[in-house]
Amino acid sequence: MIVFNTISETHKYLAALAYNNKSIGFVPTMGALHSGHLSLVKQAREENDIVAVSIFVNPIQFNEAKDLKGYPRNTEKDLSLLENLLSSEDFIFVPTVEEMYPKPVDKKYDFGALGEVMEGSSRQGHFNGVGIVVNRLFRIIQPDRAYFGEKDFQQIAIIRKMVELENLQIHIISCPIIREKDGLAMSSRNQLLSSSQRKNAGILFKSLSDAQSLSANHTVQETCKIISRMINAEPEFDVEYVDFVNEATLQSINSWNEADSIRCFLAVRADKIRLIDNIKIYPFSQ
């Protein structure tokens, strides 16, 4: 594998790949890699001639300076993990903030209703920052396919909308959530949890899983309340939101027969650590 730190050297390498008509699969990351990230890299490796991975903690998608400062970083370990998966032709792009943003950023996206709910409502400006950095990375790497994990299901919808707005010819691939043994969705933020918080964090997936059976004899509103109570019963966790939405629009539903495809989303605070997760729901007939 090859490591690039600048856009110019990356473009020089990409020119040679384009000449040989090689397909590129791209996995954008903020580092602190785990098995979830590596599963994306493995899928990209299977489906493309060349795999590109970026490692960049994007400052403009963070709402709180403390969250940005505390975000886990270990580039040396990340490169070691990737070395076992990537070929000699694959490459990793590890830019500085100055390389990515040489000038102040003022672009504003309109993602419509997709960006106004759940994470969009809770984290003002977050998705605009995501759209900006992913657009820049796409234009630098010029991939044929880009791979994202469904833990950030709403983000995938936002990125697909950005690709449409920017008229980019890139196929966005969504990949299944990779979970720990207790069901907790793998996330770089998990390593920030205290031992006690991590021990009890399985309640998030348990509550999501229970939503399936609850839908048999409870309304959407009742199910939301039950799930919230389950999680809040753990003193170290505080529910920010639980929402059942139409997968196609990400808008909240009021009844189980309101959409063909339903997904339950939640966001939970563990002190200063914020965890998100989601699961597809197959409701029973009411």
Image: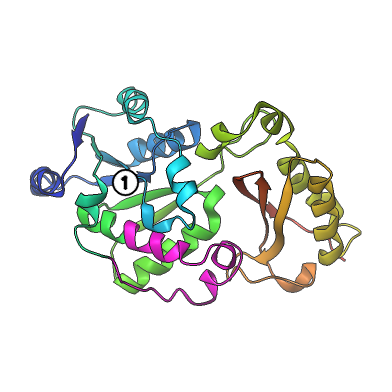
Q: Is 32 situated left or right of 277 in this image?
A: left
Residue most toward the front? 66
Residue 10 appears in which quarter of the rendering? top left
* Residue depicted at 31% across the width and 46% down the height: 26
* Residue depicted at 25% across the width and 28% down the height: 87
Residue 127 belongs to the span the image colors magenta? yes
* Residue depicted at 91% across the width and 59% down the height: 217
- Image coordinates of residue 17 in percent, x first then y, are 13, 44
- Image coordinates of residue 37 in percent, x first then y, are 44, 37
* 73 w.r.t. 83: above or below: below
Residue 51 belongs to the span the image colors magenta? no
Q: Is residue 141 visible?
A: no
**Could you tell me which quadrant the N terminus lies in?**
top left
Q: Which residue is mark 1?
A: 26
Residue 86 appears in which quarter of the rendering? top left
Q: How is the image coloured?
A: rainbow
How many callouts does the rendering have?
1
What residue span does the magenta drawing correspond to?
A: 105-134
* 268 w.r.t. 91: above or below: below
Q: Circle 1 — which element?
A: strand
**Could you tell me which quadrant the C terminus lies in?**
bottom right
Q: Is residue 56 visible?
A: yes
* 81 w.r.t. 44: above or below: above
> In this orientation, which residue lies closer to the viewer: 196 or 218?
196
